[in-house]
């Protein structure tokens, strides 16, 4: 217990990185995933193929591999110092890897959300002369959003936990802090684990709370 | 010695394990397997010798020290050679050795629970560890050092120059902890040293740190680009772990390694492994007496 | 698929779609080509590398890694199903002494990153568990908790009348659970269990943190020995993609078969949603 209190600054520093990676990759993955989902329902065959291949490739690859490849890839193509806002370049590598991976899951969630919108809605949109993009943007997606929130919640929670893998690609986030502290204070391994684990539990609870709130706000009587 | 290396190289070709990075030698010394050995009944040596097999705990991810070449059955490295020397003295040949993978955290438990007979796994001798297990040696002395880019060798000459700089090592390593705690460096943890070296080459980190022995190997791979700088700023005395209070066994281990140091097998083992990258063979260290 | 989103294309729209398709295909090809070209320019595909990778020991290393990955995943999935079933039963129990601890265990292990669990089991109990068992047990704790929720939903999806009927003919509560509800829940949930196999397989890769000799660990060793990272790791990724893609197809196929058979009656449609979204979402691990 004392170990946790004494090292609170370091633990907080770790979680700050965890939260930052969660925030940025959450946003990037949502944007990329939504674009990919619109590819997957589009009338253009090759876009659908791109979307499908993307999902099959990234959803089925272990995150560890994606992160290791990301950390090796960007410097190889000449991008070796792309840290932003004072976060190291490794944070950027990890964020890019996490986003690319998570986008595949977001894409599938959004796609099934789109499919869950009643057929009549799309038909009505089309009958008033809306184009594919218009009906998607103005009619389908806003409604799909509601259906998408529960699966998105699971995805963001998974993402929060997945940021821990960045501990082996150069980011000293919370999981790294746990490993480091348990090296240093061998007799307190259990307390250190529980303390760091609690941090993640709190993040998960806050996330699901926030998204439940959003769900209630968006809910309409049908 | 020249002759030995040629012989080793021939062996390597036959085994088909010549790979780019870890050189074309078989990474093995010519260790003599004793015949007709006899030890006093009831000693650990007699038990092992009679059984003809021995379990040795080693690391498998430290190039030059204990490293498992992909697809090979047995690991290679200086630690492995020390293990073979100790086994050889008991009349146990390579086929009789079972290599057990250990990591830093399970070396004491493995000895305590008799999951291994000895540990030769870059196992630094410390007083804390000697409370729990026995440690014979040191059979090798190294220390934490820094690997930097050739261009930086003037500006980074020691750990003091790395305050606030990115320093890379493997996740959970004590070397990295020391840089953070004592020199205020920013930690960059990766899964393997080679990833760290890649990040050093592409200028994402300023230094890679771990035991000098390992760093020298990487520096030798790219002598024009990378350089090991400064003196070692910690002393790591690698010892052979055995189960506590087995003084006779400790004496056997110490004597066997001493004999290998005297007859040149130790030097040969070094040349075939750590020395592979062009590092000069050091003087063998003075070993502690067994209590 | 989503034909409702656009009209059946007429000749002009078809032409436009074809042009769009061609443009998108060209762009994607150019993008991928640029990446490959740049990597080739940086020497990531040099012929020496391919020669090294053709050595027989590389194939052996990949074989060993794959075996380790599959065996850890197989043990983990079997144990997870058992652990998940036990947790689900406890959570569905009428007794608070079982229900509450089960809920706490499930929520805790679902919220803690697997990497932390693996490190904890391994370093916290280094005198009890080898790297293999540390990985398997951590996988079991996490995936068992996920599956417990899947089973619970499955049990709830079995029409109520069945458990009432079972009680009416005099079955005890444990009998209702073990011989009526669970067997059906597991069958309904079979596709979800297979999807979970994909998650487990991918997650064995986290064993690298404790140097478990799985496919990714071997790929790292190969990367070290051939002095290139990208190609060996990409090869490992390819193997995972092939296996996991096949498993996903199997899951989809099973799901469709169950849907056709109208299994689970009223629960049928309910399980279908529940099945893919939350579980697949959770598959982000």
Image (spheres, coloured by chain):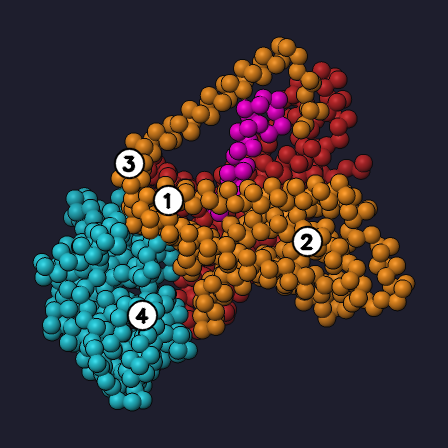
Chain colours: A red, B cyan, C orange
The x, y position of residue B130, in whole percent, is: 31, 79
The residue at 15%/64% (across/down) is B268
Gap between marks 3 and 2 measured at Cα:
48 Å
Left or right for B5, reference B88 = left
Q: Earlier in the sequence, mark 1 or mark 3?
A: 3
Which of the chains bears the disc numbered 3?
Answer: C
Q: Is residue B144 visible?
A: no
The x, y position of residue A42, in whole percent, is: 61, 25
**Of tags 3 and 2, which is closer to the observer?**
3
Residue at label 2? C150
Residue at label 1? C232
Q: Quadrant of residue B124?
A: bottom left
The residue at 26%/52% (across/down) is B17
Residue at label 3? C46
Q: Above or below — where is C231 with respect to C130?
A: above
Left or right for B86, reference B53 = left
Neighbour tally class for label 1: few under 14, some 14-19, many 20 plus, Cα within 10 Å:
many
Gap between marks 2 and 1 measured at Cα:
36 Å
Q: Which residues are magenta?
A: A39-63
């Amino acid at each position: 217990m004392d170990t946790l209190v004494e090292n609170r600054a370091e633990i907080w520093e770790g979680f700050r990185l965890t939260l930052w990676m969660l925030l940025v990759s959450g946003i990037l993955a949502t944007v990329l995933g939504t674009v990919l989902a619109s590819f997957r329902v589009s009338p253009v065959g090759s876009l659908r193929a791109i979307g499908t291949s993307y999902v099959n490739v990234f959803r089925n690859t272990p995150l560890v591999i994606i992160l290791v490849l990301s950390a090796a890839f960007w410097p190889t193509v000449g991008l070796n110092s792309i840290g932003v806002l004072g976060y190291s370049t490794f944070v950027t590598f990890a964020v890019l890897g996490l986003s690319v991976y998570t986008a595949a899951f977001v894409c599938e969630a959004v796609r099934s959300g789109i499919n869950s919108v009643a057929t009549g809605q799309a038909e009505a949109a089309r009958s008033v002369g809306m184009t594919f993009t218009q009906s998607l943007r103005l009619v389908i997606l806003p409604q799909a959003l509601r259906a998408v929130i529960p699966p998105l919640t699971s995805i963001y929670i998974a993402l929060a936990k997945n940021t821990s893998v960045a501990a082996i690609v150069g980011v000293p986030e919370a999981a790294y802090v746990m490993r480091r502290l348990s090296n240093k204070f061998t007799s307190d391994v259990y307390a250190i684990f529980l303390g760091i684990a609690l941090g993640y539990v709190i993040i998960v609870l806050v996330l699901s709370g926030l998204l439940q709130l959003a769900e209630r706000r968006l809910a309409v009587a049908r | 010695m020249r002759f030995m290396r040629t012989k080793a190289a021939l062996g390597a070709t036959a085994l088909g394990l010549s790979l780019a990075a870890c050189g074309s030698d078989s990474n093995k010394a010519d260790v003599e397997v004793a015949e007709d050995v006899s030890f006093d009944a009831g000693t650990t040596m007699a038990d092992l010798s009679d059984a003809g097999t021995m379990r040795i705990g080693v690391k498998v991810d430290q190039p030059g020290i204990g490293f498992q070449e992909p697809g090979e059955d047995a690991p290679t490295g200086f630690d492995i050679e020390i293990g073979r020397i100790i086994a050889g003295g008991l009349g146990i040949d390579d086929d009789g050795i079972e290599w057990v993978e250990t990591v830093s955290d399970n070396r004491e438990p493995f000895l305590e629970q008799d999951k291994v007979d000895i540990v030769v796994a870059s196992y630094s001798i410390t007083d804390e560890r000697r409370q729990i297990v026995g440690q014979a040696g040191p059979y090798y002395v190294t220390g934490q050092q820094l690997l930097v880019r050739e261009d930086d060798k003037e500006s980074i000459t020691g750990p003091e120059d790395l305050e606030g700089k990115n320093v890379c090592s493997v996740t959970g390593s004590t070397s990295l902890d020391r840089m953070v705690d004592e020199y205020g460096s920013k930690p960059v943890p990766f899964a393997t040293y080679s990833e760290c070296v890649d990040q050093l080459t592409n200028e994402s980190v300023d230094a890679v740190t771990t035991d000098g022995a390992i760093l020298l190997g990487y520096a030798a791979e790219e002598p024009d680009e990378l350089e090991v700088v400064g003196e070692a700023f910690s002393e790591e005395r690698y010892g052979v772990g055995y189960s506590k209070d087995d003084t006779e066994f400790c004496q056997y281990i110490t004597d066997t390694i001493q004999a290998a140091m005297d007859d040149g097998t130790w030097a040969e083992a070094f040349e075939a492994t750590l020395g592979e990258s062009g590092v000069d063979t050091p003087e063998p260290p003075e070993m502690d007496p067994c209590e | 698929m989503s034909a409702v989103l656009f009209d059946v294309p007429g000749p002009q729209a078809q032409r436009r779609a074809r042009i769009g398709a061609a443009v998108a295909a060209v762009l994607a090809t150019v993008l991928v080509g640029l990446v490959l070209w740049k990597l080739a320019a940086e020497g990531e595909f040099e012929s020496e590398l391919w020669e090294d990778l053709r050595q027989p020991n590389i194939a052996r290393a990949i074989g060993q890694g794959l075996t380790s990955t599959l065996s850890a995943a197989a043990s983990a999935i079997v144990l997870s199903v058992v652990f998940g079933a036990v947790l689900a039963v406890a959570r569905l129990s009428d007794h608070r002494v079982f229900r509450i601890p089960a809920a706490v265990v499930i929520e805790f292990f679902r919220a803690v990153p697997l990497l932390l669990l693996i490190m904890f089991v391994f370093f916290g109990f280094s005198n009890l568990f080898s790297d293999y068992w540390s990985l398997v047990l951590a996988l079991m704790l996490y995936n068992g908790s996920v599956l417990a929720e899947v089973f619970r939903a499955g049990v709830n999806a079995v029409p109520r009348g069945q458990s009432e009927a079972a009680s009416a003919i005099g079955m005890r509560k444990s009998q209702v659970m073990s011989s009526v509800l669970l067997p059906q829940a597991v069958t309904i949930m079979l596709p979800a269990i297979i999807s979970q196999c994909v998650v487990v397989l991918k997650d064995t890769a986290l064993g690298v943190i404790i140097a478990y000799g799985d496919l990714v660990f071997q790929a790292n060793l190969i990367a070290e020995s051939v002095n290139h990272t990208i190609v060996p790791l990409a090869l490992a990724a390819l193997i995972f993609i092939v296996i996991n893609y096949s498993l996903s197809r199997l899951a989809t196929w099973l799901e469709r078969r169950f849907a056709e058979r109208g299994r689970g009656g009223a629960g049928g449609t309910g399980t279908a949603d529940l099945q893919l979204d939350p579980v697949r979402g959770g598959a982000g691990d």
